[in-house]
Image (cartoon, grey):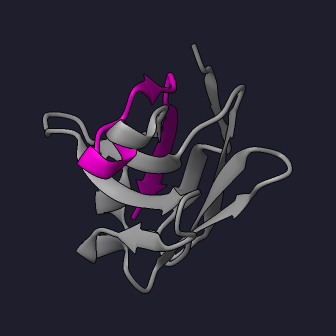
């Protein structure tokens, strides 16, 4: 069982920046970020594959968010710039624990979430 611990959420103003981090306690094949705003479904934000080293982003995240990784620390980061009130959500870190999950785009492990609130 892999544990994921997210840090870095908080309250910021519109156009501010915020960085989230997620450290995994064990081996993973990809790590990513999802978010869930109040009253909405959880949505994909970005992910970084350990297998091919390629980052993937949701359309709304392209150009504003950057996902990166530190292999030695087994950590993935999400740098969020030019934040908007609509970015307000609970941000979850997720990880694929097997190659099969990675290939199927599934996530086996989830963090508890870190809250991001963007005021206008």
Above or below residue 28? Residue 82 is below
Looking at the picture, how far across and down is residue 50, in whole percent?
Answer: 58, 57
For this orientation, the residue located farthest to the bottom is: 63
Above or below residue 120? Residue 101 is above
> Quick one: 6 or 23, which is closer to the camera?
23
> Quick one: 50 or 89, which is closer to the camera?
50
Q: At 22% across and 35% down in the image, what residue appears?
A: 38
The quadrant holding residue 81 is bottom right
Q: Is residue 35 left or right of residue 12?
A: left
Above or below residue 71? Residue 26 is above
> Quick one: 27 or 67, which is closer to the camera?
27
Q: At 43% across and 42% down in the image, what residue appears?
A: 99
Image quadrant containing the N terminus: top right
Tell me where the magenta segment starts and ends, as one range: 101-120
Q: At 69% across and 60% down in the image, what residue appears?
A: 69
Count all numbered tags in the image, as a single digit.
0
Q: Is residue 90 visible?
A: no
Image quadrant containing the C terminus: bottom left
Q: In this view, does 109 lie to the left or right of 53?
A: left
For this orientation, the residue located farthest to the top is: 1
Magenta-drawn stretch contains 110: yes
């Amino acid at each position: 069982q892999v544990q994921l611990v997210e840090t870095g959420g908080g309250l910021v103003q519109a156009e501010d920046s915020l960085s989230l981090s997620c450290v995994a306690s064990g081996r993973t094949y990809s790590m990513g970020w999802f978010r869930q705003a109040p009253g909405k479904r959880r949505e994909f934000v970005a992910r970084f594959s350990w297998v091919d080293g390629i980052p993937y982003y949701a359309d709304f995240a392209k150009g504003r968010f950057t996902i990166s990784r530190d292999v030695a620390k087994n950590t993935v980061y999400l740098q969020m710039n030019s934040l908007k009130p609509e970015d307000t959500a609970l941000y979850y870190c997720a990880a694929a624990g097997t190659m099969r999950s990675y290939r199927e785009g599934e996530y086996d492990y989830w963090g508890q979430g870190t809250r991001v609130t963007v005021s206008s």
